[in-house]
Amino acid sequence: MKMTAWRSFHLQLQRALRLRFGTIQSPTLLLFTNSFHSFTFHTTLQYAYFFTSNFQSASFTDLDDALASFNHVIHMDPLPSRVQFSRFLSALVKMKQYHTIISLSKTIELLGISHDIYSLSILINCFCHLHLVDFGFSIFRKILKFGLEPTIVTFFTLVNGLCKEGKINQAIDFFSDLVAEGYQLDVHTYTILINGLRKFGKTNVAIGLFKGMVERGCEPNAVTYTTIMDALCKDNLVVEALDLFSQMRNKGISPNVIAYSCVIHGLCNIGKWNQALALLNEMVVHNIAPNACTFTILIDNLCKWNQALALLNKMVEQNLSPNVISFSILIDTLCKEGMVLEGDFDEALALFKAMEKSLLEPDLMIYSILIDGMCKAAKINDAKELFCGLFENGLQPDVYTCCAMIKGLCKEGLPNEAYKVFREMEEGGCLLDNYYYNIIIQGFLKHKHIPRARQLIDEMLGKGFSADAMTNELVAHLLHNNDLILRKLENHSEDSKDGNVK
């Protein structure tokens, strides 16, 4: 351990004691010597009883409280037992004080208190939480060297630690070695490895492990089934996932909301919306309340916006709060279906207002979708108002939002306002490319703002960008008397074909 870590630990203890008792007679705290200095505390035996009782019950309000109790009991004669020290360290695990536990374990060892399997397992757990699984395996080797018998919890912790650090192949090898040695691993250890395999796309290996656990007499639980079904659905093996879903119910294991949502998602992905909706109804029949995630999956995949809207209303009826994703999907669906183009923009706007009333803050994606829809529906004033609202709500428009706004302004004959947005994009650090230049140039050309168009064409060509077919056509039509601009565009186009322009 580094000296800075020990020094920090000393300071923590001193601070805890000062908070409890005020001035400490001895300025230094020496925990790691053979003899301990006596501290003169302005307190009574009641405090001593308080600290001892706190330590034995492992009941602390915070870390300072725990350290003060620890400092008191290490001066006792006799010292607490290993079991009491382990109970104390377990309480610190619940407080997620992993570094402190490692430091205190060394102190306890120096006091002459031998480790047992439980204290060493606590250490392994701390190292794994700190993403130091290799140190955890050093402790594991110590367990074997001392002739101690590892517990199921020890194995689970190490397998979980390897999976968390992405060492999935090492996890498989370690697991296989344990099975070969004859250790009976529990459902939690199997499940955590299956989940790790799922995350790394090793679905076939996960299925093999799933079958193997059944053959070895370890029955999968609801989490195990759900994990495998999720892996199968992500690989579009939905039929196989449904078979497992049926198998799960036949064994008397009730699917939970996560299992249902997983299969519903898989069905939606392969276009089986009616089956997905049937499963939703089945959930309700079995008194399994769909959550926001379940509804969002369905809303995201339903083709008709009115069906999706009905689901949103059902969410509200069940006192489920739709999230930002649910609203953004519905608003996007309205726009994509052409509702906005037909002028029926009230539904999308109503959803936006409903979202604000639900105290959800619309994100940039929702603003962008709406601005784009408003522009396409020729509601440019509404789009401008919403665009300004972005800044009022502390959001910064991205390239997509600005592009939608520029197109909308140009379409409505407001190229100068579009030009202002264009320059604000540049000032905001956006790298304007060929695409954006052509949009703004076309806006000026269509409304016969020739001087500004010329300026932007020169600027575009100077940056090494080319005019697209639409820009070339507009230039040829409107600037037929200006051979210079035409020649510039033609020459640049030829250079681009020759590979001279980056």
Image: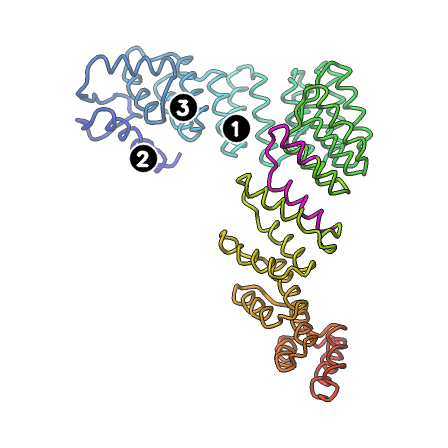
Query: Circle 1 sits on which residue?
Result: 136
N-terminal of the pair, mark 2 or mark 1, is 2
Query: Circle 2 sits on which residue?
Result: 7
Residue 323's place in the image compared with 487, above or below, is above
Q: Position of residue 427 (x, y in %)?
A: 52, 67
Instruction: Name the secondary structure under disc 3.
Output: helix
Q: Position of residue 62 (x, y in %)?
A: 36, 25
* Quarter of image, res 248: top right
- Determine the CA span between mark 2 and mark 3: 16 Å
Neighbour class for label 2 at 10 Å: few (<14), some, many (≥20)?
Answer: few
Instruction: Name the secondary structure under disc 1.
Output: helix
Q: Going 52% across and 63% down the picture, which residue do you hit?
A: 428
Instruction: Name the secondary structure under disc 2.
Output: helix
Amino acid type, residue under disc 3 in the picture:
Ser
Residue 2's place in the image compared with 140, above or below, is below
Taking depth in this image into account, of 353 and 62 the one nearest to the observer is 353
Query: Circle 3 sits on which residue?
Result: 105
